[in-house]
Amino acid sequence: MNFRRIWSAVGGGILLVSCLVAQSEPLNLTEAKSAVREYHDSGRYQSDVQRVAGWANTWLEQRAAMRKTGERLLVIFDVDETVLSNYPQMVAKDFGYVPEDWVKWVDKAAAPAIKPMREVYRVARKLDVDVVFITGRRAPEEETGTITNLELQGMGGYVRIIFRGESDTAETAAERKQLRRIQLEKEGWTIIASLGDQGSDIAGGHAERIFKLPNPFYEVP
């Protein structure tokens, strides 16, 4: 505990007030939200994303140049806060999550592209590297809006998009996405890069390189 003394003027005199303040108190939620907004709106978030995208583009170009005859190269992208930004919806809800409102947002197909990551997508396709999206969005209720949104933002030329389905038995996103990567390898692809905003997007290996984007907004285990 931190002992603080506060001097106050009371009735023309001076009163010494003693109070106890808990040092373990976490950052106030209002302050935390303000810090997140400042990080995003100041341009620092975009700068950090751009830096990761630059690393990814460099790797894709290098790896594509080393392609072996007949090798099927694949890049895996997450969707939310990786290629599509939900920041407008998050701010409108004061960073709260209401499932019904989230589904309505997805249905609108209005999420803007995260431009540096859309460029990584375009670089992959230009290099004849296949793309698969593995997302935590649910099937079937979020399929149509997601597919439409990706197409509207210029990212419709992928091989497959893998949603979270009712038959998925993995307890965590990390486990589910790892199992999906393993299955893609069994189908004959060489996964040269996996990109996501969550540690769970890229945990567990089965990719030659992993690229982690910043996400101060939420965490998915």
Image (tube, rainbow, N blue to C red):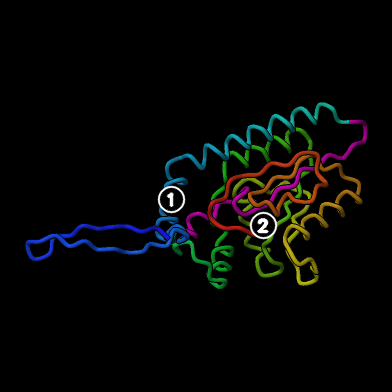
Of residues 201 and 93, the one nearer the viewer is 201
x 73%, y 55%: residue: 134
Identify residue type, mark 2. Answer: Ile
Q: Which residue is mark 2?
A: 147
- Is residue 80 a member of the stretch shown in magenta? yes
Secondary structure, mark 1, is helix
Q: Looking at the picture, how far across and down is residue 141, in whole percent?
A: 66, 70
Tell me which segment is drawn in magenta.
68-90
Secondary structure, mark 2, is helix
Task: Establish if 109 lies above or below 46.
Answer: below
Task: Establish if 168 lies above or below 132.
Answer: below
Between marks 2 and 1 in the image, the one whose residue lies nearer the viewer: 1
**Quarter the N terminus occupies:** bottom left
Compared across the picture, whether 168 is left or right of 120 comes to: right
Compared across the picture, whether 60 is left or right of 185 comes to: left
Q: Which residue is mark 1?
A: 35
x 63%, y 45%: residue: 154
x 73%, y 38%: residue: 125
**Quarter where residue 15 is shown:** bottom left
Within 10 Å of disc 1 (Cα), the crowding (few <14, some 14-19, many 20+) is few
**Quarter the C terminus occupies:** bottom right
Query: Which one is earlier in the sequence, the residue at label 2 or at label 1?
Result: 1
Identify residue type, mark 1. Answer: Ala
Q: Looking at the picture, how far across and down is residue 137, in whole percent?
A: 67, 62
Within 10 Å of disc 2 (Cα), the crowding (few <14, some 14-19, many 20+) is some
Q: How many marks?
A: 2
